[in-house]
Amino acid sequence: MAETVVPSPVIAPVSSGYRRYALWVLLIIYTLNFLDRQVVNILAEPIKRDLGLADWQLGMMTGLAFAIFYTVLGIPIARLAERKNRPRIIAASILAWSAFTLLCGFAQNVWQLIAARIGVGVGEAGCTPPAHSLITDYVPKEKRASAIAFYSIGTPLGTLAGMAMGGLVADAYGWRVAFMVAGAPGVLFALVAAFTLVEPRKRLAADLAARATPSIGFGAALAVLMAKKTFWLVAFAASIKAFVGYGQAPFIASYFFRNHSADIAALAAQFGLKSAGFLGLSLGLIGGTAGVIGAWLGGQLADRMGAKDLRAYVTVPAIASLVTLPFYIAVVSLDSVGAAIGVLAVPMLLGTLWYGPVYATTQSIVPAEMRATASAVLLFVINLIGLGLGPVAVGALSDVFAGPMGLGEAQGVRWALIVSTMFGLLAFALFWAARKTIREDMVG
């Protein structure tokens, strides 16, 4: 017999003071999540030299190896999060990804490194779906996009920390030590999550028993999502954004090293740094600061404009996707390193505007009992296409331009970045198409 979707009970909100505390804790956790995920990007060139890798292998290590298990395991962990204690699931996940990040530092060949990166993906699969579900329970509906955007600031913050710390530590002690430093803080925050984050469902035990409300099975949850055209338009638009962003991330530092190595060394010397430390710090500060502003701004714009017209939740990321294109092409076309890094702030800012609107839309078009599942399915699509295929595709493009097309490594990576940027046109079209359906698909 087919399962039916029933209305969810309203979870009593936590106090405003506790809400602020919980959001900060989840932000720090997500920052560590992305630090451990992205530190490999500034380490790509020394790893490539040390282990003798091709660019497609770098893409495999940074993207596909991580993404396959991250995406596949996200759904069963999310199903668990619909019933079990979400803070404890998050805590266990932190311990797992931190341990495997440490193990990356002991890898002796590419396959050992890939295996460790798979472990990082397994751990990180248990973070965002339960976190999104918790945040949606903690905050009122009218502040949902802003709250999820605040959590999503962990993406640029973690990238900033990973690039800056990874480059500085790698220059001083080598890439292996950088992995170890990245993985260490997770143990502390696993304890913080387990013992200080509140599971709101406990407050509903009596009410749930009285209502005898059944949980939504995965088949019924998937049926709900299949009927939501907005979900799929937004999911594939975001996956294209991720394809471009994740695909380019492992190679932007390589682009600068291969095309501007002398200028970078000269600039680094002025600050008493080596090249990797200077570039990691520069890219981290520019990308991280711009990304934080973009993620915050996206949530604010969506909530304020969405109060008048729900289409703002997809209009904001649509326009940002289009405006990004000329600025990123300029970054990889300028002769001046300083100018290129400065201009990079614009696409970095615009590239994070979609976080709050997209994740809030997903949480708002489904019943409360399947919010973690909806988030996991969204992340499955985004990360399988974006994180799984993006780095491999950009790396393969770089190899083709460099080898068969005879452009060499420096120009090969430049053209791979330019070609991949143009996929933003497809993201714009998908976001814009969602304007037609978003108002009828919202449920709360």
Image (spheres, rainbow, N blue to C red):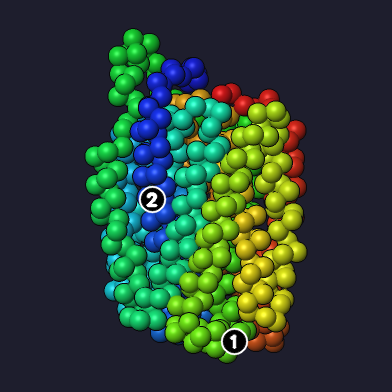
Q: Can residue 223 be seen in this view?
A: no
- Residue at 59% across / 79% down in the picture? 256
Task: Provide the residue designation for mark 2.
Answer: 28
Quarter of the image for residue 207 reads top left
The three-letter amino acid code for the residue at tag 1 is: Asp
Task: Return the x and y of residue 303 as percentages of the image width and height.
Answer: 61, 34
User: On the rendered structure, is 408 left or right of 195?
Assistant: right
Q: Which residue is drawn at 27% across and 38% down?
A: 196
Q: Name the residue under label 1.
A: 263
Label 2 Cα neighbours within 10 Å, binned few <14 / some 14-19 / many ≥20 = some
Q: Which of disc 1 and disc 2 is earlier in sequence?
A: 2
Identified at 54% across, 38% down, the residue is 146
Neighbours of disc 1 within 10 Å: few (<14), some (14-19), many (20+): some
* Residue type at tag 2: Ile
**In the depicted structure, whether residue 274 falls above or below residue 139:** below
> Helix, strand, or loop for circle 2?
helix
Going by the image, does 443 lie left or right of 23?
right
